[in-house]
Image (spheres, rainbow, N blue to C red):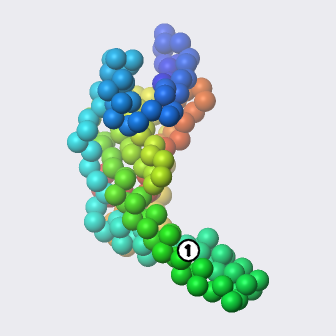
Amino acid sequence: ICAGANGDEKIESNILFPFVAGERAIQLLPELLPDFTITNEMKPLPKIAIWVKLIRPSYFWIIGTAALLYFWPDKWYFSIGLLVLITVLRILEYFNSAYLLSSPFIQLRTGTFSTEFFITKKSKIEQVIVSESWLQRKAGLATVKIISRGTPMHEAEIRDLPKKE
């Protein structure tokens, strides 16, 4: 998404190649948007973040297990499969998440099956929301939500980022 509306720039918002492979999109981006610089050296989440992700309660699993045990108690083993699936998804989310905040750009990569790569200039940020749960506070982590200027506004969020960042 490319956002304008700052000074003499015209207002524009474009979504570029939503179904292109990540490597190919990174190759095309400098040709299409020469003002943007993509750095492949992004920081991974800290190791404690994987434990926070695994310990965090899964309300989907709790409600799904309760419904399963109420309607189909003989299929109780599906609850174990659902728990394993949720655990694998959280581990994949940890390994697929990365960030870079130290350049004139902010880069965030999140996702499990589909990856969202968010890059914006710091000057295009409209709002930054930092929140933390009790578990994140104990681990020194936080959730960062960035809202960029543009029409429409775009929100990007990364969970379990080091609070000092």
Q: Label 1 sits on what residue type?
A: Leu
Q: Residue at x 66, y 76 (%)?
A: 63
- Residue drawn 48% across and 47% down? 114
Residue 135 visible (yes or no): no
Name the side, left or right, on which 94 lies relative to 150.
left
Q: In the figure, 44 relative to 66: above or below?
A: above
Residue 136 placement (x, y as % from top left): 41, 67
Q: Nearer the viewer, residue 75 or 30?
A: 75
Q: Is residue 41 left or right of residue 18?
A: left
Q: Is residue 99 above or below residue 53?
A: above
Residue found at the far top of this picture? 8
The secondary structure type at the circle numbered 1 is helix
Judging by the rendered image, the residue that carries numbered circle 1 is 82
- Using the image, determine if residue 56 lies above or below residue 126: below
Residue 10 seen in the figure: yes
In the rendered image, residue 90, in percent from the top left (x then y), is placed at 44, 65
Give the residue displayed 41% in from the left and 40% down from the top: 117
